[in-house]
Image (cartoon, helix red, strand yellow):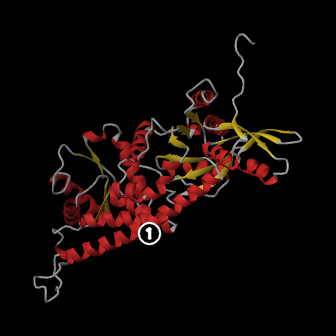
């Protein structure tokens, strides 16, 4: 069941309903019926009006349903009342997404993040209206009083487990920070793939890196982060990171829980926003992704964000040709490129754009090394891109390009032997 309200004006109700069905099938449930409930004013006790509650009760009984999905956030009281009225298990949108994440997480980090989100959600469900949690346990006799109720015990135990998981995730965060520092010592720029779930990020990741990340036509097919090296046409090497997909009304528990993973996005040199350009709600999905990025602390005005318009193979031929024509330099903004991760169309344009953007952020330096300094020469080739090399009896002159970190290391290792290269520009008088 999808809720229709004024807040959904940016997204077609049918599209939201289809997304809810896709989320449901993603955890192996069979959808036997779906409907859109128009809500003029939310009912505190059940969200929807009593007439609609009775109508859906009859549907649940007639179809012998086991679970009812409400594509909206339910309060604990609303969930309990609907379960009583319909006689089936009721899941709201948050619980449904948590179920999917719980099934898909494979790494220890992913499982910890899902458990944290789930426990945070469950703790909000512990309300005194749940009578089965109101029984008391005996307290310490010397303290007196009625003792600790079951709900208080459960809340305390959940709180202790949440604290423990947060501590373990802090270890994960520190480990990731160490890995990022190690990569900066290499140093390779990082490009992070983000986008709405099922936009084709993992398919693109696999196509570019020949990796074997799970890529299916399924919401949240990828949960655990994956990173691989990628060599661009110029010879420049980068690290490509595949991340969890975003979705409209992503539960705040998940945004918080997956912050350790999504920090890869915060640290990335380039953010590749993969969009399903063939989807009817592509613009609304873009808005949802940008909202989550903002919640993570990504300032769109200060970061390099490239829109990767994916799935052009699903568009009409003339539309596809038009989008591909705009990939060429000088014909479109250099923050957008059209591709098909399935057919491979436009991938060369994407690689060229990455090369161009990373090149703009690099500095070219001239380094004079001793001819006997083989280690220093090898270090230059390993940590930068050598554009030119010349020899003399006293030195080996290298023209090297790289990011700011590489430049700083050259200046630190070879003081007085490094200078920023500034090529002479031809002027009107000298031409």
Viewport quadrant of the C terminus: top right
Residue extending farthest to the bottom is 141
Q: SS at mark 1? A: helix
**In the figure, residue 310 lies in which quadrant?**
top right
Q: Name the spot of residue 296 as percent of width and height, x first.
A: 41, 49
> Toward the viewer: 3 or 87?
3
**In the figure, residue 142 lies in which quadrant?**
bottom left
> Toward the viewer: 153 or 36?
153
Q: Name the spot of residue 54 as percent of width and height, x first.
A: 18, 57
Q: Name the spot of residue 167 as percent of width and height, x first.
A: 41, 68
Which residue corresponds to the image point at 85% horizontal and 51% vertical from the top-left?
372
Residue extending farthest to the right is 393
Which residue corresponds to the image point at 56% horizontal and 32% vertical from the top-left?
316
Alpha-carbon neighbours of circle 1 within 10 Å: few (<14), some, or many (≥20)? some
Instruction: Work out whether 150 lies above or below 412.
Output: below
Residue that mark 1 sits on: 168
Q: Relative to 410, is 66 on the left or the right? A: left
């Amino acid at each position: 069941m999808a809720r229709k309200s004024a807040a959904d004006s940016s997204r077609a109700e049918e599209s939201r309903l289809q997304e809810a069905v896709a989320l449901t099938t993603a955890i192996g449930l069979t959808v036997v019926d779906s409907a859109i409930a128009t809500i003029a004013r939310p009912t505190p006790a059940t969200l929807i009006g009593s007439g609609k509650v009775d109508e859906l009760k009859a549907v649940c009984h007639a179809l012998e349903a086991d679970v009812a999905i409400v594509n909206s956030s339910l309060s604990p009281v609303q969930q309990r009342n609907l379960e009583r009225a319909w006689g089936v298990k009721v899941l709201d949108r948050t619980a449904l997404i948590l179920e999917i994440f719980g099934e898909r997480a494979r790494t220890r980090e992913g499982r910890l993040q899902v458990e944290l989100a789930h426990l945070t959600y469950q703790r909000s469900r512990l309300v005194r209206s749940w009578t089965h949690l109101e029984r008391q346990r005996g307290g310490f006799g010397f303290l007196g009083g009625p003792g600790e109720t079951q709900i208080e015990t459960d809340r305390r135990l959940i709180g202790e487990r949440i604290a423990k998981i947060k501590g373990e995730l802090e270890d994960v965060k520190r480990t990731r920070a160490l890995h990022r520092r190690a990569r900066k010592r290499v140093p390779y720029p990082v490009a992070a793939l983000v986008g709405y779930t099922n936009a084709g990020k993992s398919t693109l990741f696999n196509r570019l890196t020949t990796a074997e990340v799970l890529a299916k036509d399924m919401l949240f097919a990828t949960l655990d982060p994956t990173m691989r090296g990628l060599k661009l046409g110029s010879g420049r090497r980068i690290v490509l990171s595949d991340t969890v997909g975003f979705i409209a009304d992503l539960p705040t528990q998940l945004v918080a829980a997956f912050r350790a993973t999504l920090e890869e996005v915060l640290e990335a040199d380039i953010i590749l926003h993969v969009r399903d350009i063939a989807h009817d709600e592509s613009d609304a999905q873009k808005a949802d992704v940008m909202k989550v990025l903002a919640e993570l602390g990504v300032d769109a005005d200060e970061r390099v964000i490239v829109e990767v318009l994916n799935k052009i193979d699903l568009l009409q031929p003339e539309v596809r040709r038009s989008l591909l024509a705009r990939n060429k330099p000088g014909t479109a903004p250099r923050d957008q490129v059209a591709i098909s991760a399935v057919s491979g169309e436009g991938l060369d344009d994407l690689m060229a754009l990455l090369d161009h953007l990373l090149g703009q952020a690099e500095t070219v330096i001239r380094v004079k090394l001793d001819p006997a300094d083989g280690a220093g020469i090898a270090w230059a080739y390993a940590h930068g891109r050598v554009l030119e090399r010349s020899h003399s009896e006293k030195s080996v002159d290298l023209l090297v390009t790289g990011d700011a970190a590489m430049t700083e290391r050259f200046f630190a290792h070879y003081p007085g032997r490094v200078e920023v290269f500034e090529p002479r520009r031809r002027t009107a008088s000298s031409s």
